[in-house]
Amino acid sequence: MADYRTIRAGEGVRTGVIDEGLRAHMNRVYGTMSVGLVVTGLVAWALAGLAISAEPTQYALGNGEYLTNFGYTLWASPLKWVVMFLPLVMVFAFGAVLQRISAAGAQLFFYVYAAAMGLSISSIFVVFTGLSIAQTFFATAAGFAALSLYGYTTKRDLSGMGSFLMMGLIGLIVAMLINLFLQSPALAWAVSAIGVLIFAGLTAFDTQKIKTDYIAHAHAMDSEWLGKAAIMGALNLYLDFINLFMFLLQFLGDRR
């Protein structure tokens, strides 16, 4: 008969290995997400610098600023629809090809996607002041950190929230598409308020799911699966952060 203390010692070692691996996995997820956010921010900021100028053009923004020809093409011509929907198309494509590409390929795709998102949201520099964008970013970072920490540490099973939040997300997307044509301020306010709540919930839910998925597959120690899981987890948290930021900006941002 196996010695009880030997069994318990073996379980303790295995649990310690999983805990150490989980910390490394979460660090990789958060690190990849953070690099993606930096890429998005730099692309958006660089494009805004090229699109907005103090040199007079026919496209006046007010406050002594003007759109350059590049800015007009990017944000006011029919090309704006391509710029707007490119990240949505790419995220669906990412889900379709994830199983057929390597972990390194998935990471590269994620960074390209982050750059495309920077292109898509760069117009916020036309609508909002730079200071309010920075303030909203830091407010989002603080809220995201608290929500993600809750999702990681809570003993409550958040899986039941998943279906509810996804249904809410689908409804939110439909409402946003409708308001592209209606341009209703009341609907825009409602969409932003609901969007903050949905992505706050998704931040906690996605964090817990990343943790539980790792624990469920840790025994296999498949490095390729772990690499792709970290990228997918980073993508989910990245999307939670970006959308939380964009919806909060509607409330906290000072318009030009």
Image (tube, rainbow, N blue to C red):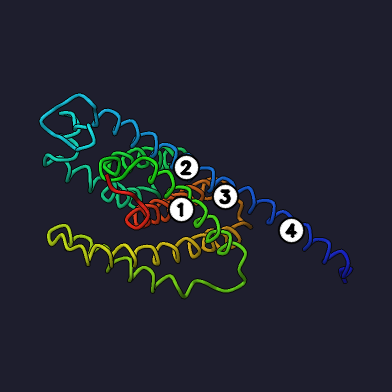
Residue 127 picture location, percent across and down: 26, 45
SS class, disc 4: helix
Per the rendering, the mark at residue 14 is 4
Question: Separation of disc 3 and disc 2 at Cα?
Answer: 12 Å
Question: Separation of disc 2 and disc 1 at Cα?
Answer: 29 Å
Residue 159 picture location, percent across and down: 49, 72
Mark 3 or 4, closer to the camera? 4
Question: Separation of disc 4 and disc 1 at Cα?
Answer: 37 Å
Looking at the picture, tell me which residue is in the foreground, 177 or 59.
Answer: 59
Instruction: Residue 64: name its quadrant.
Output: top left
Mark 3 or 2, closer to the camera? 2
**Callout 4: few (<14), some (14-19), or many (20+) C-alpha neighbours within 10 Å?**
few
**Callout 2: few (<14), some (14-19), or many (20+) C-alpha neighbours within 10 Å?**
many
Q: Which of marks 4 and 1 is nearer the N terminus?
A: 4
The residue tagged 3 is 222
| Marks 1 & 3, CB-CB < 8 Å contact | no
Q: Which of marks 2 and 4 is nearer the N terminus?
A: 4
Is 201 above or below relative to 90? Answer: below
| Marks 3 & 2, CB-CB < 8 Å contact | no
The residue tagged 1 is 140
Instruction: Residue 129: name its quadrant.
Output: top left
Q: Please name the residue shown 49% across and 43% down the image.
A: 34
Question: Separation of disc 3 and disc 4 at Cα?
Answer: 16 Å
